[in-house]
């Protein structure tokens, strides 16, 4: 999850994004810190809309 980088590039805080997307800061923090096991398509779409990005800009697959 590249949420922290995208927020920094856009000069936006996690709290501001949470307000715009309609989710809690805690839920976005879980996403940002790679602790989420899933994300709703509606949430992903809303985040991408507010950050003006595509899902591939936000997510990448990590192989451990």
Image (cartoon, helix red, strand yellow):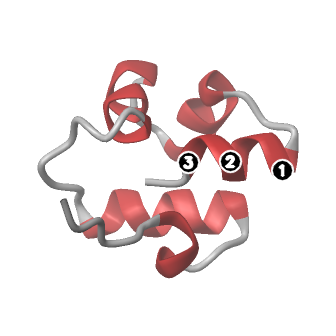
Q: Secondary structure at mark 3?
A: helix
Residue 35, image x, y percentages = 23, 35
Which residue lies under the disc numbered 1?
A: 9
Residue 54, image x, y percentages = 57, 80
Q: Quadrant of residue 29?
A: top left
Residue 18, image x, y percentages = 54, 33
Spatial distance from mark 3 to mark 2, Cα to Cα? 5 Å
Spatial distance from mark 1 to mark 2, Cα to Cα? 6 Å
Which residue lies under the disc numbered 3?
A: 3
**Contact flag, marks 1 and 2 (Cβ < 8 Å):** yes
Residue 38, image x, y percentages = 15, 54
**Contact flag, marks 3 and 1 (Cβ < 8 Å):** no
Q: Residue at 62%, 22% (x, y): give it.
A: 15
Number of other residues with Cα within 10 Å of mark 2, as a class: few under 14, some 14 to 19, many 20 or more: few
- In this view, the residue in front, 37 or 17, is 37
Residue 55, placed above or below residue 25: below
Q: Residue furthest front?
A: 64
Q: Which mark is residue 5?
A: 2
Q: Quadrant of residue 4?
A: top right
Residue 44, placed above or below residue 61: above
Q: Earlier in the sequence, mark 3 or mark 1?
A: 3
Q: Which mark is residue 53?
A: none
């Amino acid at each position: 999850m590249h949420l922290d980088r995208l927020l920094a590039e856009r000069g936006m805080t996690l709290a501001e994004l949470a307000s715009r997307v309609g989710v809690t800061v805690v839920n976005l923090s879980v996403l940002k810190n790679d602790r989420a096991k899933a994300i709703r398509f509606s949430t992903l779409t809303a985040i991408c809309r507010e950050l003006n990005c595509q899902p591939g800009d936000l997510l990448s697959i990590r192989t451990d």
